[in-house]
Amino acid sequence: MAPVIFGLPFSEFTWSKFGNANMWNKVYHLRRTKFIVYQLAMIFCVVSESLGTDALSRYVSQQKYIQSHGAPANEYNNDYVGVASYNIFAGIYVATIFGGAFFFDLIWPERHEDHGVRLGWKLSAIAGIFIHLASCIAMTVIVATHSAYVTGVSTAEGNRLVMENGKIVLDYKHSARIVTSVVFGWIGWIFVIASTVILVVGKNHDEKMGPWSTHVREAKKNNIDVESNFVNGQPSEKPLTNPLTGEQPETLAPNHPQPAHIHEPIRTQEPAMEMQSNHHSFDSSAPAVNPAHT
């Protein structure tokens, strides 16, 4: 028997939950909208983080090269290393919050959450807006106004060492990786706001109305099991609409009259009438009757 941890039955953790039929159905409120916007927020923030991390590692590698090949030369890049490190934290935070929301809504959409848990989800998502905003502002200011530089040697010697290493340019705003990281960070922040709004609206709806869509709630009032009908592939007796497509089944769709079944009358054979013949008996010993004497 699969364990139940924090009220979440692991028996529901199946590969079919990752299929299109389950992920993009209309059974649950805002399900498809959540999954699209959550993923966009995570993708843009993680791409920004990844590009920034790549540039950070290049600066660290270049700094080590200059220190070893041009002593007492050294490269100053602490401002970018610091802000890129914070951008990594911001990207991980966004991925943790909305990645977790995506995962739990996908596997356990009907889970029970106390008011405190829902409040925690909301506050964490709202905090993500300001955490990532701070990262975007800091990245933008430092990239636009700051630059790395080489100390301990002349400018010409410093430029020679940088060109010799060839990892990355000293001016931050002239690095395509860094600029792209900043742009993706701002786009990701927009989707973080959208994801937060959707998460808060969804949690409020779940607390008041439950996790199901409007048409599913109406079906449940009539004891119609639309979930098993369209999610598990088991047809119910009275489906309202298909939660996967929103279309009405053919049996209930308007303007589709069913062909009339005309039953031909069954011809039955009438019972044969028995013809009874009248048999007259004559007495040969009786005298003949003369009609003239009657």
Image (spheres, rainbow, N blue to C red):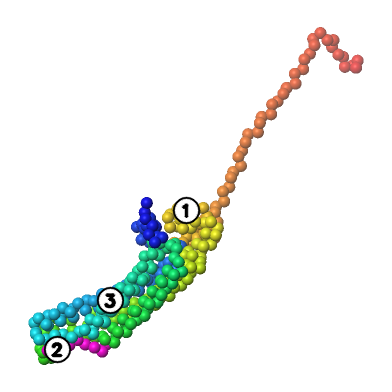
Disc 3 to disc 1, how far (Cα)? Answer: 48 Å
Disc 2 to disc 1, how far (Cα)? Answer: 74 Å
Q: What amino acid type is highlighted by mark number 3?
A: Ile
Lower position in the chain sequence, tag 2 or tag 1: 2
Lower position in the chain sequence, tag 3 or tag 1: 3
Q: Secondary structure at mark 2?
A: strand
Q: Residue 159's spot in the image, x, y percent?
A: 13, 87
Q: Residue 164's spot in the image, x, y percent?
A: 11, 82
Q: What amino acid type is highlighted by mark number 1?
A: Pro
Residue to which mark 1 is pinned: 235
Q: Residues within 10 Å of mark 1 (few under 14, many from 20)?
A: some
Residue to which mark 3 is pinned: 88
Q: Residue 24's spot in the image, x, y percent?
A: 40, 64
Q: Residues within 10 Å of mark 3 (few under 14, many from 20)?
A: many
- Can residue 143 be seen here? The reply is yes
| Occupied quadrant, residue 41 | bottom left
Quadrant of the drawing holding the C terminus = top right
Q: Is residue 68 left or right of residue 284?
A: left
Asked if 205 appears above or below 59 in the picture, the reply is: above
Q: Identify the residue shown where x is 83% and y is 10%.
A: 286
Choose mark 3 or mark 1, whichever is in front. 3
Residue to which mark 2 is pinned: 151
- Can residue 159 be seen here? The reply is no
The stretch in magenta equals 144-152
| Occupied quadrant, residue 55 | bottom left
Q: Secondary structure at mark 3?
A: helix
Q: Identify the residue shown where x is 48% and y is 68%.
A: 207
Q: Residue 288's spot in the image, x, y percent?
A: 84, 12
